[in-house]
Amino acid sequence: MRAGAERPADGVEIIESALHRLDAHRAQARRPYYLSLLAEVYGLAGNRDRAASILDAAIIIALERADVWWLPALYFQKSELEPPPERDASLRRGLELARAQNSRALERRILASSIARSV
């Protein structure tokens, strides 16, 4: 099992440290993806508010930098932290983007999720 899943605090520390090293080298490619990993570990640690704020930042970065390959997954991940009205909107957005990108695997994952049954 991954360190983040077994010991979320260690996972947070590892990922944040890696992000700081990337920042020091001005390496920003794939930042939304790396932020989604950090948000996942914060969620495992029980800090849903921090996870949601990281996902919001990742979505903004993805849109600003046109680094949208991971955007459907970000909306899906965000939907898991939201109450029903916002959750449904995020799920729909993630599904639309997955379909637009021809990401059949992510589309199936979204449709198979327990939270998608209401959408």
Image: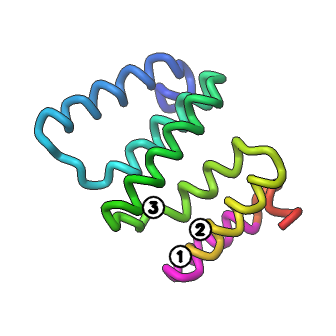
Residue 103, numbered label: 1
Locate residue 7, reporting x and y percent.
53, 18
Q: How many marks?
A: 3
The answer to whether the residues at label 1 and label 2 have Cβ atoms under 8 Å apart is yes
In the image as oriented, which residue stretches furthest toward the left?
A: 25
Residue 106, numbered label: 2
Query: Is residue 11 positioned above or below 84 on the image?
Result: above
Span highlighted in magenta in the image: 98-111
Q: What residue lies at 80% left-to-right and 62% top-to-bottom?
A: 116
Residue 70, numbered label: 3
Q: Secondary structure at mark 3?
A: loop
- Residue type at numbered disc 1: Ser
In the image as oriented, which residue stretches furthest toward the right?
A: 118
Mark closest to the chain's N terminus, 2 or 3: 3
Does the segment drawn in magenta span residue 108?
yes
Q: CA distance from mark 1 to mark 3?
A: 10 Å
The image quadrant where one finds the C terminus is bottom right
- Residue type at numbered disc 3: Trp
- Residue type at numbered disc 2: Leu
Q: CA distance from mark 1 to mark 2?
A: 6 Å
Does the segment drawn in magenta span residue 93?
no
Locate residue 15, reporting x and y percent.
36, 30
